[in-house]
Image: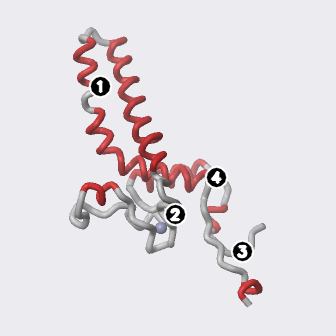
Amino acid sequence: MNDGIGDLTAQAPRTLGKALLYGRRALALRCPTCGITPLFSSWKKVGSLSDWFSPSDGCPSCGYAFEREPGYFLLAIWGVNYGVVALGGMVLYFALRQWTEWSPRLIFCLTVLPSPLLSILLARHAKSFFLAMDHFCDPHVRHKKRRENIE
Ligand SMILES: [Zn+2]
């Protein structure tokens, strides 16, 4: 039942256009709901590497909470970040083995050694895409209390 209160765009049906919109916002590291607020602080404002990897608490423009619960972004790191880097490295390794005459040692060095650095570089985008996917598949909508319940 829709009580007429809340984020109506999040309740609208899932469409390809909405998925692409959320994907563009995730690529730009922006709030998936409004696309205005950056998810992460800039280099100049962070005090440590940990702060650089940590998203803000929420969006001051639309009120969307980025971290729903403690450990929320754990799946983003293990599923999205590690999955993309490991699967991409494996696919590239076997593709180079199949289509080049390079030595397996050289191919291994080219595909596996950059993985830790790639994983660090993609960590913020993994969290951003995970947040966008989660908002697309399971949007959390803030409902205000009904007036009759308050009185
Ligand atoms: Zn927002």
- Residue 4: mark: 3
User: Please, what is the three-letter code of the amino acid marked with disc 4?
Assistant: Arg
User: Please, what is the three-letter code of the amino acid marked with disc 3?
Assistant: Gly
Mark 4 falls on what kind of element?
loop
Measure the C-alpha gap from mark 4 to mark 3: 19 Å
- Is there CB contact under 8 Å for labels 4 and 2? no
Disc with the residue nearer the chain's start (1 vs 2): 2
Mark 2 falls on what kind of element?
loop
Measure the C-alpha gap from mark 4 to mark 2: 14 Å
Mark 1 falls on what kind of element?
helix
Which residue matches tag 2?
33
- Residue 58: mark: none
Disc with the residue nearer the chain's start (4 vs 2): 4
Horizontal and vertical percent for residue 77?
42, 45
Horizontal and vertical percent for residue 112?
29, 26
Disc with the residue nearer the chain's start (1 vs 3): 3
Which residue matches tag 1?
111
Considering depth in this image, is 51 or 16 the residue closer to the camera?
51
The residue drawn where x is 51% and y is 67% is 64
Mark 3 crowdedness (10 Å alpha carbons): few <14, some 14-19, many ≥20: few
Most extreme residue toward the top is: 101
Residue behind label 2 places its C-beta within 8 angstroms of ligand 1: yes
Mark 1 vs mark 2: in front: 1
Q: Left or right: where does residue 137 sit relative to residue 149?
A: left
Horizontal and vertical percent for residue 25?
44, 56
Measure the C-alpha gap from mark 2 to mark 3: 18 Å
User: Please, what is the three-letter code of the amino acid marked with disc 1?
Assistant: Thr
| Image height of 1 relative to 131, above or below | below
Which residue matches tag 4?
14
Measure the C-alpha gap from mark 1 to mark 4: 36 Å
